[in-house]
């Protein structure tokens, strides 16, 4: 059993059956713009209500695209209006919002949120502050000066959190190695998804027609923000080199971002713009996953990508770069295929393997689906967090720490 599975089992042992005494939980994020972290927060709010919590959200910078989903649930969503750069005055503004919401628990997401909400919650005497780190930003810093500044900043922010959650073992390992947060605070809680939402196969043929994808051609796809770190250009160049397979595969990119125009230009320059389809941001990615035959993730950095979990839940074979927490998620040749980040030839070879061996692709997809259903369900993640909230509340507010 891995470290993450041990932490998950320990936290959920007695949390899966009985409704909870009401607790007020405020999730603090920079914004609810498009992204895996933001979708996790929206899901935690939704499932938190079902668990008996009174959830709310504070966005430090702006509400973002997913804010409407949270507000549609009748959940308060407040914005601190933080401007770019380090703005210490934001601490005071967050303190005002916390005074209004009166939370029992403040749960911050990404270190930038903890920098402001940690001190604000401390001054407002919020009983419990916890934090989740969703990406391994520490590992990206190469210079000694940046590493020193990161340690200092993380250490200061981390002092306000009673638990420092990490979504994957590699993030937790980096936090411990840099000694930014005491090891006793660090706990791995894997991301979870609503696996049931991906179980029913949508009418993929009509969707393919709408996207301009011909009948019968294989579709390789990915879901994620179109930015440099996701390296979708690698996928486009690899697709362009697959010329011996008939019919030639098409590529479906679901997501939007600053790299969309350069990626479209790259496809045009390579003469494959008719085989590369940009679907833009989609609030229901499961429909588009069902239109794919193979899922590929080409990122240079990842924590524990939701996109892989969702692809598995849709029954897709996964090809992914060997970065961050991915190698601990994906068992090579069992639940997916891995290649070294940036290795275009290796990516192309793996995609050809699956295109020419549909039985192998089907076995990988089925194994991934079983794995995600058993290990990474959304409700298990939400109940794990709630059990941690209650364990911490038990020391200062015993009534809130217990279940009815």
Image (cartoon, rainbow, N blue to C red):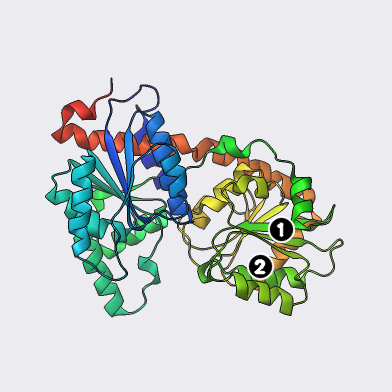
Residue 235's disc number: 2
Measured in 3D between alpha carbons, the distance from the residue under mark 2 to the one under mark 1, in whole angstroms, is 9 Å
- The single residue placed furthest to the right in the displayed view is 246
x and y, in percent, of residue 63 in the image: 39, 54
Q: Secondary structure at mark 2?
A: helix
**Is residue 5 at least partly visible in the picture?**
no
Q: Secondary structure at mark 1?
A: strand
Q: Residue at x 17, y 43 (%)?
A: 126
x and y, in percent, of residue 360 in the image: 74, 49
Where 60 falls versus 262 (above or below)?
A: above
Where 264 falls versus 195 (above or below)?
A: below
- Picture quadrant where residue 249 is located: bottom right
**Is residue 42 at least partly visible in the picture?**
yes
- Picture quadrant where residue 265 is located: bottom right
Position of the N terminus, as image quadrant, is: top left
x and y, in percent, of residue 330 in the image: 56, 52
Q: In the visual, does 141 lie left or right of 105?
A: right
**Disc 2, disc 1: CB below 8 Å?**
yes
Q: How many circles with numbers are drawn on the protein?
A: 2
- Picture quadrant where residue 341 is located: bottom right
x and y, in percent, of residue 66 in the image: 46, 50
Q: In the visual, does 77 lie left or right of 207?
A: left
- Tell me the crowding category of disc 2: few under 14, some 14 to 19, or many 20 or more residues within 10 angstroms, Cα based: many
Q: Earlier in the sequence, mark 2 or mark 1?
A: 1
Please name the residue that numbered disc 1 is placed on.
220
Where 57 falls versus 251 (above or below)?
A: above
- Nearest to the observer: residue 132 or residue 189: 132
């Amino acid at each position: 059993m891995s470290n993450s599975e041990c932490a998950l089992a320990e936290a959920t042992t007695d949390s899966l059956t009985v409704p909870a005494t009401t607790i007020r939980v405020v999730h603090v994020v920079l914004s609810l713009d498009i992204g895996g972290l933001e979708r996790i927060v929206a899901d935690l709010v939704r499932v938190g209500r079902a668990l008996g919590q009174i959830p709310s959200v504070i966005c430090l910078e702006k509400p973002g695209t997913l804010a409407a989903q949270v507000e549609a649930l009748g959940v308060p969503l407040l914005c601190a209006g933080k401007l770019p750069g380090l703005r210490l005055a934001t601490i005071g503004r967050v303190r005002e919002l916390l005074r209004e919401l009166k939370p029992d628990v403040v749960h911050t997401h990404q270190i930038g949120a903890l920098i402001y909400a940690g001190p604000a919650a401390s001054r407002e005497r919020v009983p419990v502050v916890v934090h989740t780190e969703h990406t391994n930003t520490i590992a990206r810093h190469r210079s000694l000066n940046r590493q020193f500044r990161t340690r200092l900043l993380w250490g200061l922010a981390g002092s306000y959190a009673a638990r420092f959650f990490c979504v994957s073992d590699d993030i937790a390992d980096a936090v411990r190695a840099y000694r930014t947060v005491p090891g006793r605070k660090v706990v791995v809680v894997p991301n979870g998804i609503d696996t049931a939402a991906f179980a029913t196969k949508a009418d993929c043929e009509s969707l393919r027609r709408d996207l301009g994808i011909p009948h019968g051609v294989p579709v390789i796809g990915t879901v994620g923000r179109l930015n440099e770190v996701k390296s979708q250009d690698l996928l486009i160049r690899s697709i362009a080199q697959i010329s011996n397979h008939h019919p030639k595969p098409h590529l479906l990119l679901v997501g939007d971002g600053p790299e969309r125009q350069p990626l479209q230009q790259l496809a045009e320059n390579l003469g494959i713009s008719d085989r590369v389809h940009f679907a833009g941001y989609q609030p229901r990615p499961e429909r588009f996953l069902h239109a794919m035959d193979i899922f590929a993730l080409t990122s240079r950095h990842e924590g524990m990508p939701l996109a892989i979990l969702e692809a598995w839940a849709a029954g897709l074979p996964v090809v992914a770069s060997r970065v961050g927490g991915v190698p601990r998620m994906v068992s090579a040749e069992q639940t997916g295929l891995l290649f070294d980040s940036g290795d275009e030839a290796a990516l192309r070879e793996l995609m050809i393997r699956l295109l020419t061996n549909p039985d192998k692709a089907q076995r990988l997809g089925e194994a991934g689906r079983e794995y995600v259903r058993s290990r990474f369900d959304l409700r298990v993640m939400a109940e794990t967090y709630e059990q941690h909230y209650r364990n911490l509340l038990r020391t200062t507010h015993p009534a809130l720490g217990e279940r009815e």
